[in-house]
């Protein structure tokens, strides 16, 4: 339970479906509600599949590239900290998308896979978080199961948020979204620092 209480917020906050709402609305402004909902569903399924894949098979990346778990924890923590700092400034992280990619998404007929699923929902920070979380616990099978469960819960919530993006935007307004972004960014920053500390401790002990 304690591991799940770390994994679920970490995955949800780094995926950040609430922060994606304004961009999703901008990119689907010319689409019918039915098409927007369909793209949101496909994006969430694809993004969840990508994160689940890296949670299940990410350890092979370490073996293929000869990267130690400690080094990846440290690098993943740094990447997560950059994302968290952008959230604290209520800015869209450039590790997830750039203004050019957002503009291109506005012009695209179908944004479900690119840029919505990747890199907006399942970006580098989310992938690194899934892999680092699995590697943090000695009981790898249990950790993997809990991370995959966290991913599933996160993307069910993400689909519901994107499906009702217009309502979310009207209720929270820009100020409400910014406040939530900052709160989530603060918690995510703390998780990122813990990742860095764990990785640095392991590297120092080598």
Image (spheres, grey):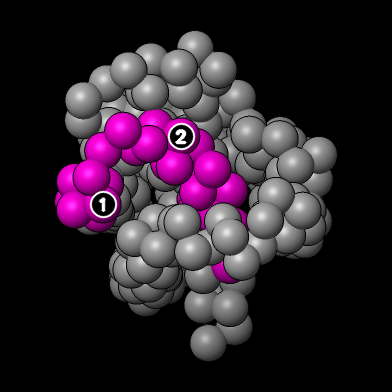
Front one among 8 and 28: 28
Residue shown at 65% from the left, 62% from the top: 172
Q: Tell me where residue 144 sits by quadrant.
A: bottom left
For label 1, the SS is: helix
Residue on which disc 2 sits: 26
Residue shown at 67% from the left, 56% from the top: 173
Compared with residue 197, is residue 108 higher up or lower down, i.e. above or below?
above
Instruction: Provide residue 126's location: percent of width, then percent of height.
Output: 48, 45
Q: Earlier in the sequence, mark 1 or mark 2?
A: 2
For label 2, the SS is: helix
Residue on which disc 1 sits: 33
In the orientation shown, which residue stands out farthest toward the bottom?
1
Compared with residue 149, is residue 62 higher up or lower down, i.e. above or below?
above
Per the rendered image, the range of residues in magenta is 9-38
In the orientation shown, which residue stands out farthest toward the top?
100
Residue 197 seen in render: no
Instruction: Provide residue 111's location: percent of width, then percent of height.
Output: 27, 32
Instruction: Provide residue 66's location: percent of width, then percent of height.
Output: 41, 26
- Would residue 189 appear left or right of 135 to someone viewing this image? right
* Residue 32 is one of the magenta-drawn residues: yes
- Would residue 50 appear left or right of 204 to someone viewing this image? left
Compared with residue 58, is residue 7 higher up or lower down, i.e. above or below?
below
């Amino acid at each position: 339970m304690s591991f799940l209480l770390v994994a679920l917020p970490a995955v949800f906050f780094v995926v950040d479906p609430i922060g994606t709402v304004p961009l999703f609305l901008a990119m689907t402004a010319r689409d019918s509600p039915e098409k927007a909902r369909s793209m949101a569903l496909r994006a969430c399924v694809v993004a969840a599949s990508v994160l689940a894949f890296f949670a299940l098979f990410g350890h092979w990346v370490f073996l293929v590239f000869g990267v130690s778990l400690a080094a990846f924890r440290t690098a993943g923590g740094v990447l997560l900290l950059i994302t968290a700092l952008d959230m604290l400034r209520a800015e869209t992280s450039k590790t997830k998308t750039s203004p050019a990619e957002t503009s291109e998404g506005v012009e695209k007929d179908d944004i479900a896979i690119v840029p919505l699923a990747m890199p907006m929902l399942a970006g580098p920070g989310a992938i690194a978080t899934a892999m680092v979380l699995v590697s943090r616990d000695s009981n790898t099978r249990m950790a993997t199961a809990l991370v995959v469960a966290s991913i599933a819960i996160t993307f069910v919530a993400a689909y519901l948020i994107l499906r009702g993006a217009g309502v979310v935007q009207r209720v929270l307004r820009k100020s409400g979204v910014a406040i939530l972004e900052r709160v989530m960014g603060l918690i995510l920053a703390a998780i990122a620092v813990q990742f860095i500390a764990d990785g640095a401790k392991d590297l120092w002990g080598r």
